[in-house]
Amino acid sequence: MRIIVQKFGGTSVATAEGRQRAVRRVDQAVRDGYTPVVVVSAMGREGDPYATDTLIQLANAAYSDLAPREMDLLLSCGETISSVVMAADLRAEGLEAVALTGGQAGILTDDRFGNAQILEVNPAPMLERLRQGQVLVVAGFQGATESGEVTTLGRGGSDTTAAALGGALRAEVVEIYTDVDGVMTADPRLVPDARTLRVSSYDEIAQMAHSGAKVVHARAVEIAMQQRVPLRIRSTFSDGPGTLITFGPQAAGATWSELISNGPVTGITYVGGLAQVTLRNVREEQARVLFRSLADAGISIDLINFSPEGNSFCVAEGRADSALAILRGIGLDPVIRRGCAKASVVGSGMRGRPGVMATVVEALSGAGVTILQTADSHVTISCLVESTHLQRALIALHSAFGLGQLASA
Ligand code: ADP
Ligand code: MG
């Protein structure tokens, strides 16, 4: 059997028209001699009746004290509904489709409700059905514990489901269908001349995903890499090869000219909705408990800058008030700046290459964007900016590193 995993995101399955396009992709895979396994997300985005965000709002508005296991039971419904609807659409086209929950598909997780980790995928029940000619439609984003409790896998979880199934079933490829043509040099909603990457490496795309490119989830890319299964990100709505993610351009058969045209930067990413916290006069015993107290409250921090002159870091804006309360509780006097966003340039080509930071600073100052803070690793440089400057910052960086359509022509 040549197994292919095809995952359809929320916007792809939201409407009957989108699902028809998805059905055609599955049907084509069958015609091409593949045995498809379909993974679906919940239908639509915030505001749509069965979307995950809608279920979260339902819980928060009326039942804010739901136990984590019941919250997961509720949230998993979005994908379950979607799998049943999609299976029915496939049957209407004459395919013998069967809907499965994550647990029924053999996805075993730990019991960290809301952010469960996949421990194992038992491929046997799925392989048995596939041999009988069934097209499986698996509800993404969910699994089950050893004792049968339903769990969810955290944000972007359907991508993770697809990668994990691809690995367990030894699929030839995992296709992630979405509403853009592939992984692009920047989010096309903010940078109109963003270009689709034809091929890239797991490392690079995982890094872009970690620094905000939400087109594919980082954990899915990491699982695909561990399992050595290629990923292809492509559009449900238009034809095109999309982005192939594998061990590097060579592995994908890219030509030398495609390789050398790669500059230091592969893409520009962002994370919005941040608040910057600045602390002065932190005593040593306060420094010691500060991070632990935030961590114990489940508040993640980013862009951490600690020095004898002053200390700052960022938290999600939604957690800013809790962070402030905790910091005041240990006798600190935090200053907060809300309405911030982090813009990053990402690329394995910038390793050891001088001048990347210079280009970043020149591009941003040229666009009139104030840099509030920076952070870097060997493959990223991130700048904190005001949200109102974000789009301008992204466009300036994108053009400064020659990533636009014209640059590639
Ligand atoms: P799905 O519902 O299919 O999972 P997502 O909303 O999770 O879709 O991801 C697709 C969206 O990711 C696109 O609509 C686009 O706005 C956004 N996006 C952010 N960064 C990038 C990028 N670098 N390349 C492509 N899309 C991106
Ligand atoms: Mg997604």
Image (tube, rainbow, N blue to C red):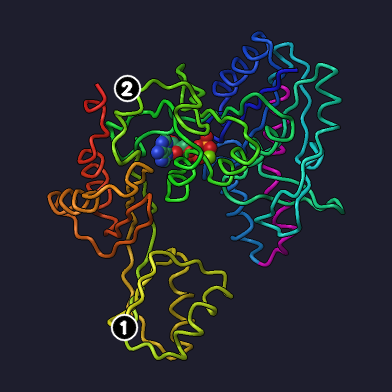
Q: Nearer the viewer, mark 2 or mark 1?
A: 2
Q: Residue at x 17, y 48 (%)?
A: 363
- Mark 2 C-beta closer than 8 Å to ligand 1: no
**Residue 92 against residue 60 in the figure, above or below:** above
Quarter of the image with the C terminus is top left
Give the amino acid type for the residue marked by disc 2 in the picture: Ser
The reply to whether the magenta stretch includes residue 82 is: yes
Residue 55 in the image: state x and y as whole percent. Answer: 62, 50
Q: Residue at x 62, y 37 (%)?
A: 41
Quarter of the image with the N terminus is top right
Residue 62 in the image: state x and y as whole percent. Answer: 63, 61
Task: Check disc 2 and report the residue beneath it.
Answer: 257
The reply to whether the magenta stretch includes residue 118 is: no
For label 1, count other residues whose C-alpha is less than 10 Å away and answer few (under 14), some (14-19) or many (20+): few
Judge by depth and name the residue closer to the eye, 259 or 238: 259
Residue 353 in the image: state x and y as whole percent. Answer: 28, 47
Give the amino acid type for the residue marked by disc 1 in the picture: Pro
Furthest-top residue in view? Answer: 31
For label 2, count other residues whose C-alpha is less than 10 Å away and answer few (under 14), some (14-19) or many (20+): few
Task: Check disc 1 and report the residue beneath it.
Answer: 308
Residue 408 in the image: state x and y as whole percent. Answer: 26, 25
* Disc 2 secondary structure class: helix
**Residue 178 against residue 393 in the figure, above or below:** above
Residue range (magenta): 65-88
